[in-house]
Image (tube, helix red, strand yellow):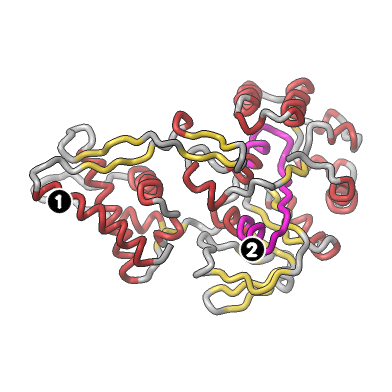
Amino acid sequence: MTRSSVEDRLVGLADLVIEAAQKKRDPEIEIPVRALSNVQFNPKRKIIEMGKNKQGRSFFNLGMARKFMQTILVADALAELQRQGLSSSLREIYYRSKHTLRDSNENTFDDQDESDPLIEDLEVTLATLREELHVRAEAGGAVVGNLVLVDNGDTVDCSRLGKGGYAVPSIVEPEEIRIKKCGADFVLLVEKGTQWNRLSEDKFWKRHNCVLLHGGGQPPRGVRRLARRLNDEKKLPVYVLVDNDPWGYYIYSVIKQGSINLAFESQRMAIPDAKFIGLSSFDPEKHKLPRNVGIKLNEKDIARAKEIMAYPWFQKKEWQKEIKAMLASGLKYELDSLANKNFRYLTTDYLPKKLKEKDWLD
């Protein structure tokens, strides 16, 4: 989507208000519902998609007037970014849109928690990504490996930045980050920075010719988008390495199928052929990890596991078996627990064996 078309869509919201005023009608914006009730799993495309349900947000409705005003104010700030060719943070958007209403003591916004969701509302309403709106979040995650990028005119060789790698920006669209060269065979997306550090320090990426990515837990959009671009543009398979717990399963799910809350972005963010390489519920036995390095599942873990089991995209027999095995054991295992074998077990034994045997879940 070009810059002008994004700006046109934002300006279109203002035109809607003007047109309604000229016709003496209540201006209303139709916003897609961002909830589980309005998402569906497309088994053919293997991604979560947003449904067609929408909710009106009007100005003359007392219960909606404030939110309507706030939505238009945020849209105006975003249009300003488009006109000036600038990017901004979520925090700056909040302050740019905040002022005190004339002849009152009431502020347009009292907290950033009010403005952030409106940007997501505008994303789904305008069918554009936050990154295309020039809104950036805090940079998170890092990459190292046989990959050369061009960032703001600077060439970045991710194989020559030491074990700390290159900090992945929040906006990695082709206009901002160009993939100049990639000689890797696959992408390994790691949940935890601690395990990514181990893999980077041991130069796993060099011995196995891969790109190592991490997102510090649930990967931020910049990390997910870079992995998707490497999958699309360079045809690299993506393997996801997470803890053996319900939250690790969900992180993998978001990378593969997309997010329930932001289902509209799945077609640009999700990686349908991403593989779950571990940590599996069957790995502790395979690798002879003692039960005392496992962590007892709590009530929240158990409830979350059962919730995930009910998702349509986890209905494969292999996944049902995987989650049931975790529940039956009553334990969850962190990737860090592999250090019980030895500090380099992850890099010298666990992952090489997984890759050789193609021991992963789809």
Residue 106 percent across, percent down from the top left: 18, 44
Identify residue for label 1: 19
**Which quadrant holds the C terminus?**
top right
Residue 337 percent across, percent down from the top left: 80, 40
| The residue stretch that appears in magenta | 227-251
Residue 203 percent across, percent down from the top left: 81, 63
Answer few, some or many: residues within 10 Å of disc 2's Cα (few below 14, many 20 plus, some between 14 and 19): few
**Vertical position of residue 90 compared to residue 362: above or below:** below
Residue 290 percent across, percent down from the top left: 88, 31
Q: Residue at x 71, y 43 (%)?
A: 242
Q: How many marks?
A: 2
Which quadrant of the view contains residue 31? top left
Identify residue for label 2: 233
In primary-sequence order, the first of circles 1 and 2 is 1
Kind of residue indicated by mark 2 = Glu
Task: Look at the numbered disc 1 and give the secondary structure of its residue.
Answer: helix
- Report whether 336 appears left or right of 304: right
Q: Is residue 295 visible?
A: no
Kind of residue indicated by mark 1 = Glu
Which quadrant of the view contains residue 113? top left
Mark 1 vs mark 2, CA separation in Å: 43 Å
- Report whether 1 appears left or right of 9: right
